[in-house]
Amino acid sequence: MKTAALVLLGLTAALLPVRPAQAQYAPLDEARTAYQQGEFDRATDLFSELADVADPAVRKEALQHLGRLYVAQNMEDRAREALTELLDLQPPLIELDPDVEPPPLMTLYYEVRKNYGQRTAGEAASYTVPTADPGLRTLAVMDFRNYAMEDHERFDPMQWGLSSMMIEQLGGATDLKLVDRENLQWILGELDLQSDLSRVDQSTAVRMGRLLGAHAMVFGGIYLMGKTMRLSARVVKVETGEILLGESVEGRQKDFFELLEALSLKVSQALNSEVTETEIGSRTETRSLDAMLSYSQGLSALDQGDYRTAYEKFLEALDYDPSYARAKQKAQSLEPMLAAAAGRPSDTGGSLP
């Protein structure tokens, strides 16, 4: 873990969003410092004051931090209030990044978004807040299913990692809007389907897609035969249930990343999105299979609410590949909760997000 711990020490400055207008605002700097040092009570008081200032950018940052602080201290109602105020700042729609925010905060965020959408657009609204671009093509990628007959346990975590990786590849390289994996997991929980994904058939996919505001859903599978790996994908059109794509790619296990990139390209082409394999490949954040497996195990632990194990797995992924940015973000997003639970500043030297 030594390499990962050293890497995390310098993350805070790199991950903080660019805020040119308020970067030198002394009260905000004071609040950030208190938060980063794990002084949660003081940080809460400071950000509460900042949440009432006139500057929308300052209010936005203050409310985001308050959401994190309240969740870390198990103050769910206060966190919900902060998120509701955050959404009231739109337009534009304020979307939290699930790679940066702790999972309990994202769960509350999706709940608040659902209620906000119903309140502003009627009870028939989807779980997403209406945007100014209803024609935007939106894609949701389900977790892949593990059908491997050999090395089944070793590759089992890839069920979670592959969907995250495909979202990462398509989201930055195409004109498609990708539904966050965390949003999809929340919907599965709402429909009581998380424990048995075999119940998610095409009709269920259509229902889920409508709730998410998605136009298409991707279902994938992993197959292993000796040293040969096959990845499959089925793209279902939400409006009609029509299958737009049923394709697979096959090759050597060691060429796993290239196989997934080729499959992502087929998915994008099925939706008439103009993109090249080179563009998709440039979005692949790691080329280490071990790092990807550890990261996938971290995602599995997150889904089960085991944040300590998830944190350790993300650090393990960093040991295999110190440049794995998404693993860094995921690990850092968990630090406030783990620090609050332990009653002390962050285990990694106070490098809070």
Image (spheres, helix red, strand yellow):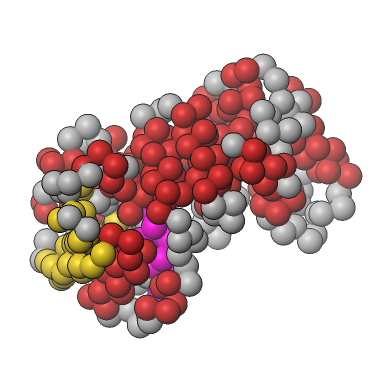
Q: Nearer the viewer, residue 185 or 349?
A: 349
Query: Which residue reaches farthest top?
Result: 343
Give the side of residue 40 with respect to residue 335, left or right. right
Q: Nearer the viewer, residue 330 or 187?
A: 330
Asked whether the viewer can see residue 330, the reply is no
Give the side of residue 213 with respect to residue 85, left or right. left
Q: Residue, x 61% and y 33% (percent of image)?
A: 335
Query: Residue 302 location, x and y as percent?
Result: 42, 34
Q: Say if the magenta span includes residue 166.
A: yes
Quadrant in which the N terminus appears: top right
Query: Which residue reaches farthest front?
Result: 226
Query: Residue 101 location, x and y as percent?
Result: 55, 42
Q: Residue, x 21% and y 42% (percent of image)?
A: 152
Q: Residue, x 45% and y 61% (percent of image)?
A: 287
Q: Which residues are magenta?
A: 164-174
Query: Residue 337 location, x and y as percent?
Result: 58, 27
Q: Residue, x 18% and y 40% (percent of image)?
A: 197
Give the side of residue 328 with respect to residue 302, left or right. right
Q: In this picture, is 34 found above or below 200?
A: above
Q: In this picture, is 194 found above or below 280?
A: above
Q: In this picture, is 175 found above or below 221?
A: below
| Magenta stretch secondary structure, dominant | helix
Q: Say if the magenta span includes residue 283.
A: no
